[in-house]
């Protein structure tokens, strides 16, 4: 079970994420960061940051499913970007996976990511 927390005493979210999420459940899943590798080939997917973000989200979906969960169970993510200029473009793709109540989130600019990826995302999910 999760409950979205929000207060006007702190800045409102500037993207598809919540200020905070209260999570209570029987199991907590800690998902390692995913980069845009095609699981069939092990190679970085071709294309722009939107294509890479979509692949990352599909990789997260697969790991969540392996744990008996889905995006509705995610309470926290961290997005790592090789270029913070990609923030809005990544948000546009990421937001499609959380159309209702998005999880809490941090976005961090980094000097580089493994295999030359432009985006990496990790997650925490709580399953009732």
Image (cartoon, rainbow, N blue to C red):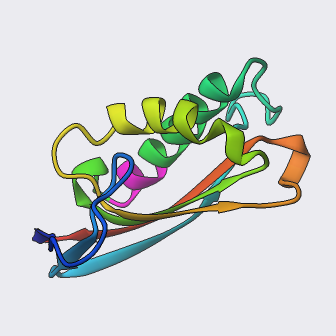
Where, quadrant-wise, is the C terminus in this rendering? bottom left
Between 121 and 20, the residue placed more toward the observer is 20
Residue 29 found in image quarter: bottom left
**Which residue is situated farthest in the top direction here?**
47
Residue at x-position 49% and y-position 35%? 58
Picture quarter containing residue 8? bottom left
In the rendered image, the quadrant that contains the N terminus is bottom left
Residue 84 in the image: state x and y as whole percent: 69, 48
Asked whether 14 falls inside the magenta stretch, the response is no
Residue 85: x %, y % from top left: 69, 40
Residue at 16% x, 79% y: name it: 25
What's the residue at 19%, 78% (across, down)?
Answer: 9
23 sits left or right of 53 in the view: left
* Residue 127 x %, y %: 21, 69
Query: Relative to the observer, which residue lies in front, 20 or 14?
Result: 14
Q: In the rendered view, would you say 118 is above or below 74?
A: above
Residue 45 placed where, x, y %? Answer: 75, 25
Name the dominant secondary structure of the magenta segment: helix
Residue range corresponding to the magenta coloring: 63-67
Query: Is residue 4 left or right of 41 when viewed as pictured?
Result: left
State left or right for residue 71 relative to residue 88. left
**Residue at figure coordinates x 36%, y 49% from the top left:** 65
Q: In this rendering, is residue 45 above or below 123?
A: above
């Amino acid at each position: 079970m999760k409950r979205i927390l929000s207060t006007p005493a702190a800045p409102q979210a500037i993207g598809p994420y919540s200020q905070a999420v209260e999570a209570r459940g029987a199991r907590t899943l800690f998902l390692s960061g995913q980069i845009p590798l095609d699981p069939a080939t092990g190679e970085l997917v071709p294309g722009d940051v939107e294509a890479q973000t979509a692949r990352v989200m599909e990789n997260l979906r697969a790991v969540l499913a392996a744990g008996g969960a889905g995006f509705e169970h995610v309470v926290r993510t961290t997005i790592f970007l090789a270029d913070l200029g990609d923030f809005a473009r990544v948000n546009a793709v990421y937001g499609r996976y959380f159309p209702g109540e998005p999880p809490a989130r941090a976005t961090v600019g980094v000097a580089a990511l493994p295999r030359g990826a432009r985006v990496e995302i990790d997650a925490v999910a709580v399953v009732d």
